[in-house]
Image (cartoon, rainbow, N blue to C red):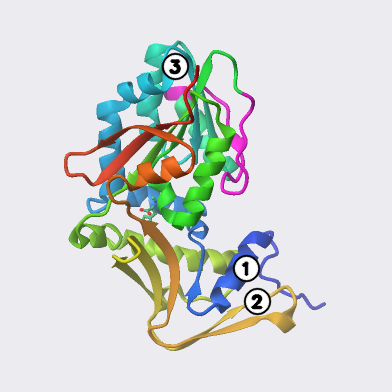
Amino acid sequence: MTTISFPLSSTKIDAQVAAAVMEGLVSRPRWLPSWLFYDEAGSRLFDRITELPEYYLTRTERGILAAHAEEMIALAAGDDALHVVELGAGSCDKTRLLLKAAVDRQDTVLYEPVDVSHTALQVAQERLEREIAGVVVSPRVTDYTRDFKLDAAVCGERRLVLYIGSSIGNFEPREARALLKNVHAALAPGDSLLLGVDLVKEESVLLPAYDDAAGVTAEFNRNILVRINRELGARFDAEGFAHRATWNPAESRMEIYLVSRRAQTVMVPSPDPDFDLRLRFAAGETIHTENSYKYRPGQAEAMLKAAGFEPARTWTDERGWFAVCLARAGTRE
Ligand code: AVJ
């Protein structure tokens, strides 16, 4: 008996992953979408990144939230009960600061994390319900970049949508505006949005944040190839690619690349062997894996305005490295 060995016998090919990989890898210049970073291993690597001495973002935003959570919650709630929605479920310990401030004002707080990953939502639910009495977690599995809907507003309740962690930085300005417009459309007058953005700063601070001495970001970047090997049966030699981080001042963004260390050919199979890809990389050829946009002071507020929001207040750290903006979706009579 002959067995045909198919690399994916145990994994289902995700059509979205396959399509994104095929499209990006045959493009010139080559690219891969940064959402591909976040498989299980990638999410764990990102958690390690947030603790690196060079990665100032998480620490700085947490400091801003710790100092001003009460005021943020008071401004968002007014005289009403607050219902907290979060885009993404990955920022547990920063979210906790806000939820704590909310349960101090009202007995119970409904917290609705929205994420594509069912597992991430489950982890968030268990942790938060265990750690903060009074928080009721109601997870919602949705790709909020594709469609974002909320249940009809409950009378006497205001919603606060959290979009923190500089997650918006991965989107092109045009996509970011569209996303904010969608959020605005789902909200009612009196509801608000809390947006965390990373700010433009010296290159000497930005570069190490995306190319740390311990090599965790490099491993995070290369993991995208490990994932493609596992899920699509590709034959990337992850160590054959170097990690590169550059600051693009004209576009105001950090850019992350994988750089082929030598000339090499990589096989990416297709379900139909006639369409297997043989990708030829020249030495030094790049795959662009991420953009991380940095905003100038006032820029996030301008973008919120363009999406229909009314910026209410912005908090920053004393170095001016990170900003958290509260914006209202119209005023309630
Ligand atoms: C999760 C998008 C906020 O852009 O700083 C960290 C991802 N990439 N190190 C960021 C990331 C490399 C991160 N965000």
Of residue 16 and residue 8, the one placed in the foreground of this image is 16
Residue type indicated by callout 3? Ala
Q: CA distance from mark 1 to mark 3?
A: 43 Å
Residue 30 seen: yes
What is the three-letter code of the residue carrying label 2? Pro
In the rendered view, tell whether residue 173 sits above or below residue 311.
below
Please report contact status of discs 1 and 2: CB closer than 8 Å, yes or no.
yes
In the rendered image, which quarter contains the N terminus? bottom right
**Residue drawn at (35%, 36%) of the image:** 325
> Disc 2 or 3, which lies upstream in sequence?
3
Q: Are marks 2 and 3 in contact (CB under 8 Å)?
A: no
The circle on residue 324 is none
Prevailing SS of the magenta stretch? loop
* Helix, strand or loop under label 1: helix
Labelled disc at residue 269? 2
Image coordinates of residue 272 in percent, x first then y, are: 75, 77
